[in-house]
Image (cartoon, rainbow, N blue to C red):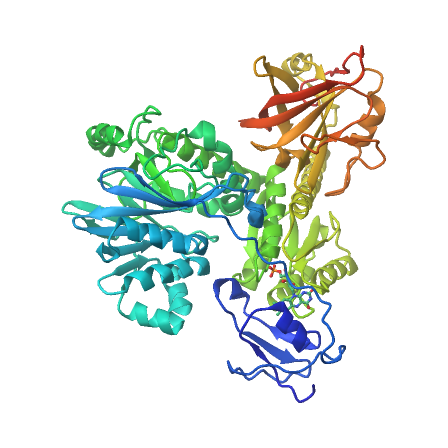
Amino acid sequence: MGALKGCIFQHQSHKSINSAGATPFRVHLPLRWKTQKRPQLAFRCSRGSRCVGHPTVRCAAAPPDTKEGTQDTREAPPKPAKVKIEGVQAVALTNTVTAMRGICNERLKVDVEYNLKRGTTDNSYLIKDGDALILIDVPDENFADAYVGALKDRVDLKSIRTLIITHLTPKRTASLKAFLSARGGQGLSIHLSNPALQLLRSTFGKEEEGADILSSVEVFAAKAGESLEVGRNGLLQLVPSPTPRWPDLLMAYMPSERLLFTSKMFSAHVSPVKAGEADGEATDRGGWECYQADWRNFFECMLAPVARQAAAALDRLDIVAAPAPSQAAPLEAVLSALRATQQALEATQTSTFGAQSMGSAGLGVGLVAAGICPMHGPVVKSSVAELVRQYREWIQAQVTASDRAQISVLYASAYGNTAALAQGISRGITKAGVGINTLNLETMSLDEVSKAVAESAGFVIGSPTLGGHMPTQVQTALGAILRDPKAKEMPCGVFGSFGWSGEAVDELEKRLKDAGFQQAFDPIRVKFKPTAKDMQIAEESGTDVAQRVLKKLRLKEKQTSKGASKAEKATETEQAVGRLVGALCAITAKDDDAESAMLASWISQASFDPPGLSVAVKKDRAAEALLSPGVKFIVNIMAEGHERPLMKQLLRSFKPGEDRFAGLDIERSELSGCAVLPDTAAYLECSVLDQMEAGDHWVVYAEVTDGRVKLEGAFSSVHHRKVGTTY
Ligand SMILES: Cc1cc2nc3c(=O)[nH]c(=O)nc-3n(C[C@H](O)[C@H](O)[C@H](O)COP(=O)(O)O)c2cc1C
């Protein structure tokens, strides 16, 4: 072993790492793996000799603690589940624009962090340019074959002369490769942002075949304010819109059709297409009422952590929603109405959202959008005004929360597993009404990390275990935190994904503990990809750390104000609201291996036929995540005189992911698998149909699909209060 200088792995398999004996090695790895298709890992042996990289070198050394040929007991990472493709559908949006979308209607367990319960679509758009065509985007690699096939059936690939790429990832370069291999590069120009161009060159362009095809393509880095000509009189304006999450994001606006191609912005992971729907049939029926929860969820996962930058990107676009069409009106009708009103709009610069013209970068005037064409989910037609207005409100709420208190979420992640946990934690923090500053340590300087922590009221730090350690970037960030005396006063937490030993999280925990830091939740250690339960724990941990931060803030505020009780301080209105009563219930919900329960009295019957009810769920409740449309849950209605043990059980504080029913004699519903609690008056099986934001709560509307009376003759337990400011 001593003679071994190092080894290059051409294939990124854990088995090969194991057989080379990763344990005594120091791993120097490019954290940009996720942006590389087949990464080469440079190892350095524990004696410090630098690895001499050569792609044909193969490491033949046996690990020191196993005999050659003995079976390796370390676990290989689970294979990612294959996404089931429904097909690729072409839908004409106008006479010149057709949406081509790859459809997946099943629940995507592989992407549990995005809560993909209603499938998703991967959209691209074909624009008629005289006799030629412009293509906007190629889909994820899962759709590559079906997509190129569908495109070939529809058009002569050679007639596509321009390709605009609004966002590029390694998985999209795979589809690009399929497209270019089928078409050839001659006579094609590609427009993309500068960061996307760098990625294209460093991945696809490095492969022999890729470099060959690319050499015949004209590639342009898009500049702000740049326009491409479309047809005789039309234009397509390109708007680079970088955010920290998507530094390469590019949007495009087509004034002649008033269509805005927004890439990831205004996307939703939901499939608006029913199975078996043919080309041209889909109309993306419905708008805000159908997809609001999906748009919101996408925003919370992807944009809430970078709200300030998202605000800047939105300002740059300065979208002015066109007057909303009636739901059934075809887009064409709206467009002609728009043509008549646009001049007036441009002259006054008054937006539909009030006098909020925010000054666009590079485009001069507000963009009148009759349709928003995103990368995922439905084309936004009837809900442009609503969606844009809500985006502004969500962003504003996030910025306001950050102004009050902010938590830094610091992480590095080579394969996205630790990143997924960071996402879950961030969601939990947002739910509690605290701002977040998410920092991918791979791309941040030490100064930026120190500044972010100094401006925060709490922090969480996450790391994968690689070669028995945390990567250098995490080590460095941890060093900066340990040196900051103010950081020691902050609620904090650690998390990370690992394969077999998981030293990184242990080390993070130990070093913070030894230095006297207060960790708000138990370390989150997840083997490879997080399950639904792991994500639940991550989310609840995020809420825990945020609530600690808020508690500290409230304590500070209390010290500066004279302390009277809530009831004494209540206004007459608040006392009057407190006269509203409800039945005392316990909601039990289950989603895959994640489960939760909560005490609830804000439940009312809301429909006779079919029977339906509404439940108000506080936004920072753990169970909130399990009450999204499509989910089943049970309302256990407590019986007068029997409520105490259940209340005692459910009102104690639980650790993230802790079993809420330990010690209770519960039964399981055959219909939903949810817990049926003992000694209740009755229970109702419910299915969530809709969700509406209502102040600091979500109002969930659910259909009652079944029910049982358990204690014949028992009265329901009623919850009385003094004021309307608490339950
Ligand atoms: C080169 C390499 C070395 C690794 N070394 C370890 C290790 O020493 N111990 C361990 O528990 N897991 C190890 N793993 C497994 C990773 O920790 C695991 O894949 C984890 O899910 C990565 O998290 P991420 O997706 O956030 O990067 C290693 C993986 C690779 C590719």
Give the residue displayed 69% in from the left and 64% down from the top: 75
Percent position (x, y) of residue 651?
78, 30
Of 359 and 129, nearer the camera is: 129
Residue 455 in sight: no
Give the residue displayed 71% in from the left and 62% down from the top: 502
Of 462 and 86, nearer the camera is: 86
Q: Going by the image, does 76 lie left or right of 650?
A: left
Ligand 1 is found in the corner quadrant, namely bottom right
Q: Quadrant of residue 144?
A: bottom left
Q: How many marks?
A: 0
Percent position (x, y) of residue 677?
78, 27
Q: Is residue 676 above or below residue 366?
A: above
Percent position (x, y) of residue 6?
61, 82
Q: Going by the image, does 197 lie left or right of 446?
A: left
Of 41 and 244, nearer the camera is: 41
Q: Going by the image, does 399 lie left or right of 477?
A: left
Q: Quadrant of residue 601?
A: top right
Q: Residue furthest top?
A: 713
Instruction: Pick the quarter of the image with the C terminus.
Output: top right
Percent position (x, y) of residue 335?
24, 32
Q: Is residue 409 above or below residue 601?
A: below
Give the residue displayed 49% in from the left and 45% down from the top: 303
